C-alpha cells in the first residue's frame, strides 16, 4: 500500500497572517478612497504596453503579499477610469460604497451557499428579504419576488426567458419582441441568447423626448399579427443610457394589457429613483409591469455586479426555471421561502444579498433617498448652467439625472458640428478633472 503524502498546508493561513493581510490591504484601500478627489478621472495612456506586461506564464512559486499589493495599487489600479471619483460623469457609474466591500469580505470568508434555502436558511432569507425590499420600492404587490443578478444585462436575459416560457409554446420562433430604438443593447443580445432571430426584435421609433411611440408600436403589432407572427413581449424603458428617457409606462401597461403582451421594464438605471417623489411621478405605471430589471450598482451606489430581476408573480420565475435532479436535495415546498436555484439559471452562485442588506440595515433607506434627491437637484442645476452658456444646445432635457448637450456654432453643417463636439469632448476629458461620455442621437454626436 502506498504511503500517504504529507499534507501541504500552504493555503491554510494562520490567524496572524490573515490579520496582517487584511491590515495591509486596508491601509492601501483607505488611502485610495481618501485620495479619490485628487486622482485623475481617466488615466489609461500606455494601456496596451501595461496590459502586455501583465501577461505571464502560470507561476510555480509565490511572491510576498506586500509586493503584490504594491503592484496592484501603484501600477494596475491607477491605469483605469475612476468610476467612483467625484468628477466621473461618464456612462452611469457605480459608487461602490465601502459598506458593500466589507459585506463582500464577510460573504467570501464565510463562504455559505444560498442557492438552496435548506443549506443556509437565515442567509437565504436575508437575500430574499432584500429582494422584497426592492419589490416594495418599485411598487410590486404581495406575491412578487425576484433574484439578485450580476447586472441589468443578466436581468434582461432572465426576464425575456421568463416571458417566453409564460407566453409562448415550445416552438417559439414566431415570437416577436418590441422595444424603443433607444433601448440598451442588452435587450437585443438577451433576445438572441434566449433563442430568437435578431429580426424578431422590433426597434420602434421614439418621439421628440426619446420615448417609444405608442401609435407606431400598435401599428407594428397589428402588422406582425397579420403576417403570422406572435407578438408576446414589449420592453419599456425607465431611464435610457443615451438620454435617461422614461417611456409613458402607464400607457404602455394599458397597451400591453389590451394586446395580451408581457411587459418588461428596463429600469436598471432609473428604477432606484422610485425612492423620490420626482422619480415616482416620472415612472408612474412601472408597478403594473410583469417584470423589471433594476441595478443597485447604479442608483443605490453599490459596487459593480449588483443587479436584480423583479417579477410581479414570483411563480412565473419558478415555472420558467425549475428543473429537478436526483442528486439535489428536496426543494422548498413552503411558499413563504424560496430556493434561488429554482428561480434562476444559476445553481452555483455567490451570497450577493449581504452587500445590500448591510448598508441599508446600518443607515436605513433615508440616506439613499436624500442622495438620489440631490442627484436630481444637481441635474436641474447643471442643465440651467449649460442652457445659460452661449453656443450650448440641450439636445435631450433630463427626465431623471442624464442629459445630452452639444456645442453649436453658426454656419457649421452637421459633419463640422460633430467634429467640433468631438474636439470639445477630447479637450474636456484630457484635463482630467471630469470625464464625460459621447453618444449619437439621430445621427448627431452629442455629449
Image: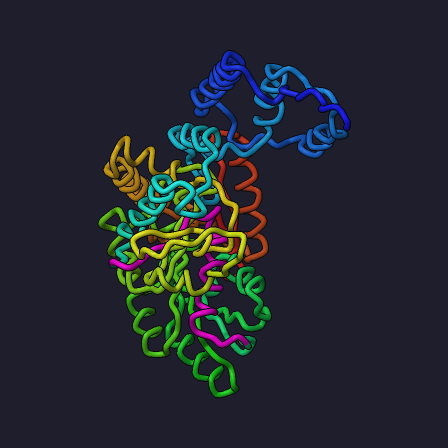
User: Which residue is drawn at the image coordinates 48% and 41% (left, top)?
Assistant: 350
| Image: 51 above or below 16 | below
Q: Quadrant of the image for the N terminus? A: top right
> What number of labels is visible?
0
Of 103 and 7, nearer the camera is 7
Does the magenta portion include 144? yes
| Image: 314 above or below 92 | below
| Image: 324 above or below 349 | below
Does the magenta portion include 310? no
| Residue 141, image x, y percentages | 25, 59
| Residue 61, image x, y percentages | 73, 20
User: Which residue is drawn at the image coordinates 48% and 71% (left, top)?
Assistant: 177
Q: Quadrant of residue 17?
A: top right
Q: Is any atom of residue 117 visible in this view?
A: yes
Of 398 and 387, nearer the camera is 398
Looking at the rendering, the stretch of residues picked out in magenta corresponds to 142-170
- Residue 195 lies left or right of residue 264; in this view the side is right
| Residue 241, image x, y percentages | 45, 52
Given the current orientation, which residue lies at the most extreme bottom position? 226
| Residue 332, image x, y percentages | 38, 54
Of 425 and 307, nearer the camera is 307
Given the current orientation, which residue lies at the most extreme front position? 1
Q: Is any atom of residue 268 visible in this view?
A: no
User: Which residue is drawn at the image coordinates 57% and 26% (left, top)?
Assistant: 78
- Residue 322 lies left or right of residue 145; in this view the side is right
| Image: 156 above or below 96 | below
User: Which residue is drawn at the image coordinates 38% and 67% (left, top)?
Assistant: 263
Amino acid at each position: 500500500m502506498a504511503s500517504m503524502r504529507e499534507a501541504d498546508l500552504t493555503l491554510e493561513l494562520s490567524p496572524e497572517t490573515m490579520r496582517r493581510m487584511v491590515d495591509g490591504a486596508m491601509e492601501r484601500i483607505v488611502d485610495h478612497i481618501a485620495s479619490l478627489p485628487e486622482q485623475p478621472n481617466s488615466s489609461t495612456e500606455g494601456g496596451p504596453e501595461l496590459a502586455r506586461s501583465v501577461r505571464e506564464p502560470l507561476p510555480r512559486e509565490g511572491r510576498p503579499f506586500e509586493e503584490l499589493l504594491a503592484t496592484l495599487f501603484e501600477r494596475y489600479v491607477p491605469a483605469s477610469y475612476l468610476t467612483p471619483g467625484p468628477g466621473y460623469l461618464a456612462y452611469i457609474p457605480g459608487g461602490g460604497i465601502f459598506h458593500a466591500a466589507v459585506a463582500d469580505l464577510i460573504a467570501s470568508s464565510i463562504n455559505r451557499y444560498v442557492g438552496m434555502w435548506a443549506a443556509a436558511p437565515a442567509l437565504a432569507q436575508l437575500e430574499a428579504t432584500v429582494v422584497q425590499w426592492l419589490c416594495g420600492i418599485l411598487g410590486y404587490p404581495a406575491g412578487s419576488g425576484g433574484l439578485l443578478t450580476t447586472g441589468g444585462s443578466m436581468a434582461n436575459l432572465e426576464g425575456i426567458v421568463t416571458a417566453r416560457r409564460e407566453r409562448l409554446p415550445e416552438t417559439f420562433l414566431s415570437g416577436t419582441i418590441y422595444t424603443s430604438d433607444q433601448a440598451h443593447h442588452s435587450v437585443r443580445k438577451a433576445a438572441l441568447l434566449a433563442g430568437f432571430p435578431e429580426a424578431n426584435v422590433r426597434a420602434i421609433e421614439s418621439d421628440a423626448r426619446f420615448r417609444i411611440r405608442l401609435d407606431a408600436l400598435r401599428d407594428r403589432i397589428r402588422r406582425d399579427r397579420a403576417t403570422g407572427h406572435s407578438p408576446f413581449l414589449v420592453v419599456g424603458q425607465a431611464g435610457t443610457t443615451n438620454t435617461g428617457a422614461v417611456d409613458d409606462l402607464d400607457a404602455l401597461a394599458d397597451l400591453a394589457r389590451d394586446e395580451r403582451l408581457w411587459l418588461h421594464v428596463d429600469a436598471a438605471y432609473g428604477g432606484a429613483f422610485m425612492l423620490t417623489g420626482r422619480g415616482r411621478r416620472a415612472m408612474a405605471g412601472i408597478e403594473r409591469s410583469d417584470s423589471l430589471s433594476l441595478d443597485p450598482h447604479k442608483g443605490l451606489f453599490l459596487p459593480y455586479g449588483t443587479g436584480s430581476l423583479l417579477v410581479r408573480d414570483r411563480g412565473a420565475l419558478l415555472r420558467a426555471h425549475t428543473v429537478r435532479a436526483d442528486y439535489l436535495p428536496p426543494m422548498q415546498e413552503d411558499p413563504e421561502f424560496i430556493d434561488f436555484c429554482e428561480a434562476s439559471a444559476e445553481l452555483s452562485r455567490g451570497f450577493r444579498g449581504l452587500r445590500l442588506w448591510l448598508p441599508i440595515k446600518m443607515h436605513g433607506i433615508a440616506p439613499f433617498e436624500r442622495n438620489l434627491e440631490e442627484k436630481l437637484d444637481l441635474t436641474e442645476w447643471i442643465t440651467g448652467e449649460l442652457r445659460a452658456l452661449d453656443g450650448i444646445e440641450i439636445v435631450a432635457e433630463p427626465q431623471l439625472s442624464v442629459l445630452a448637450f452639444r456645442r453649436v456654432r453658426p454656419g457649421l453643417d452637421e459633419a463640422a458640428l460633430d467634429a467640433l463636439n468631438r474636439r470639445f469632448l477630447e479637450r474636456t476629458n484630457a484635463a482630467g478633472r471630469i470625464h464625460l461620455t459621447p453618444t449619437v442621437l439621430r445621427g448627431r454626436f452629442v455629449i
